[in-house]
Image (cartoon, rainbow, N blue to C red):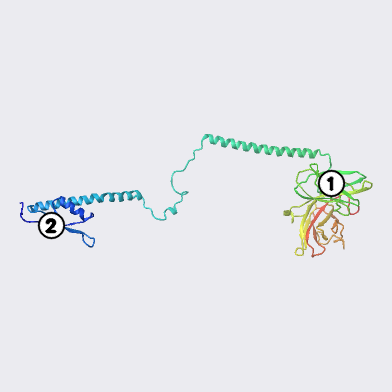
């Protein structure tokens, strides 16, 4: 049943959530043939409008017309709001993903070395492998050439040493000789170890000494007749390289005299050998001071015989005691400071028996003195103390 009411104006109160200005709302209502009353609320909340329909419009018409207006207005408002909503959705899709639940701090615990995944396989081409193989062969060839050159040089040295025109001297045994007038004696020496060596002459005659390496003298200028040994004898202290050839030449200072002499060479033991037993031809170097008043070493000969035991120091007076394996001193009374070596140093001749261990002790004559000192043991055909 349709109800029609004429001659009267109907009104309906619609609550519209307005997002447009009020003028726009009114214009839309007028275009639809509807009068509108009301306006924006003062508290900024919902806006209330009263819609006035013209007379002669049925209730159903009013209802349909108002419903249509409300539906159109609602759709318009939704369409205008749609772009902003879509943009927000897009931003959310770009910035976040529901597949990941990232918690702050997770990346701090990530270790690429222990992370899972497929092994990385390096693609080394055949060309690269060939280059590496050739490089290895080149290095091996260079090493073979280096070793061959070393072997060649060593072979030449051995041959030259075997065919040396001069007699060879060793640290284990001194050479005794006599010189007349302008005669000279020349020897070759091949050090067994690199280090400091001492060349020394003994005898009553003023001697001169030269030492050559590769044809050049290694004696300091003016020191060939330096008289740094006992009386007018020579003493040269030089650093030598193992296996090299050194030529030692001695002659008389005056060509009008005759002289007998002993030539001895000894090597200085390296520091790591300091507390090992003495060896023939090797000297121990040590420091003496009031806080370290003496140095003690031992010697066990491989064969019985006469041995010379000698000290040397940096311009200080040394004293030496030699003890038998039974504990008593072998040095005659008053001879511990006999000063028969270089300057105020010691030089003793003692007979030692093979297999027995002898103790040698060195200290400063003045216990307030300090400095480096040496002790060494050597052998000679002649007794330097009676020359």
Residue wearing tag 2: 12
For this view, does 296 lie left or right of residue 96? right
- Front in this rendered view, residue 363 or 352: 363
**SS category of the residue bearing label 1:** strand
Q: Which residue lies at the image location 91% right of the left edge and 46% below the top edge?
A: 178
Q: Position of residue 14 (x, y in %)?
A: 16, 57
**Pointer 2: residues within 10 angstroms few (<14), some, or many (20+)?**
some
Q: Position of residue 140 (x, y in %)?
A: 63, 37
C-alpha distance separating marks 2 and 1 = 138 Å
**SS category of the residue bearing label 2:** strand
Q: Is residue 160 above or below residue 353?
A: above
Which numbered disc, 2 or 1, marks the residue that appears first in the sequence?
A: 2
Given this view, does label 2 or label 1 mark the residue nearer the observer?
2
Q: Which residue lies at the image location 84% right of the left edge and 46% below the top edge?
A: 210
Q: Is residue 43 above or below residue 387?
A: below
- Front in this rendered view, residue 26 or 6: 26
Q: Which residue lies at the image location 16% right of the left edge and 50% below the top edge?
A: 31
Residue wearing tag 1: 210
């Amino acid at each position: 049943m349709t109800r029609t009411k004429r001659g009267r104006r109907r009104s309906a109160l619609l609550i519209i959530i307005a997002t447009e200005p009020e003028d726009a709302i009114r214009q839309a209502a007028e275009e639809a043939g509807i009068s509108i009353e009301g306006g924006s609320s003062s508290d900024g909340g919902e806006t209330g409008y009263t819609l006035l329909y013209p007379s002669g419009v049925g209730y159903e018409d009013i209802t349909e017309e108002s419903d249509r207006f409300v539906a159109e207005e609602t759709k318009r408002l939704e369409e205008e709001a749609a772009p902003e909503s879509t943009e927000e959705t897009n931003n959310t899709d770009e910035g976040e993903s529901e597949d990941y639940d990232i918690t702050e701090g997770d990346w701090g615990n990530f270790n690429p070395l222990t992370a899972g995944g497929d092994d990385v396989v390096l693609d080394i081409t055949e060309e690269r492998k060939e280059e590496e193989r050739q490089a290895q062969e080149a290095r091996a060839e260079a090493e073979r050439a280096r070793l061959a050159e070393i072997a060649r040089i060593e072979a030449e040295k051995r041959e030259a040493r075997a065919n040396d025109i001069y007699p060879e001297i060793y640290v284990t045994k001194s050479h005794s000789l006599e010189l007349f007038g302008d005669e000279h004696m020349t020897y070759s020496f091949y050090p067994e170890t690199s280090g400091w060596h001492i060349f020394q002459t003994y005898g009553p005659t003023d001697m001169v000494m030269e030492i050559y390496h590769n044809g050049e003298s290694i004696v300091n200028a003016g020191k060939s007749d330096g008289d740094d040994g006992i009386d007018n004898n020579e003493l040269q202290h030089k650093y030598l390289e193992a296996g090299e050839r050194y030529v030692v030449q001695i002659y008389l200072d005056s060509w009008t005299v005759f002289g007998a002499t002993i030539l001895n060479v000894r090597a200085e033991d390296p520091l790591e050998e300091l507390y090992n037993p003495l060896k023939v031809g090797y000297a121990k170097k040590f420091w003496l001071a009031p806080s370290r008043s003496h140095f003690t070493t031992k010697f066990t000969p491989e064969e019985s015989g006469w041995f010379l035991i000698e000290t040397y120091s940096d311009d200080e007076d040394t004293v030496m005691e030699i003890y038998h394996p039974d504990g008593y001193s072998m040095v005659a009374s008053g001879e511990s400071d006999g000063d028969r070596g270089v300057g105020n140093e010691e030089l003793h001749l003692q007979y030692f028996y093979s297999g027995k261990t002898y103790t040698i002790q060195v200290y400063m004559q003045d216990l307030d003195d300090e400095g480096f000192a040496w002790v060494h043991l050597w052998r000679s055909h002649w007794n330097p103390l009676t020359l």
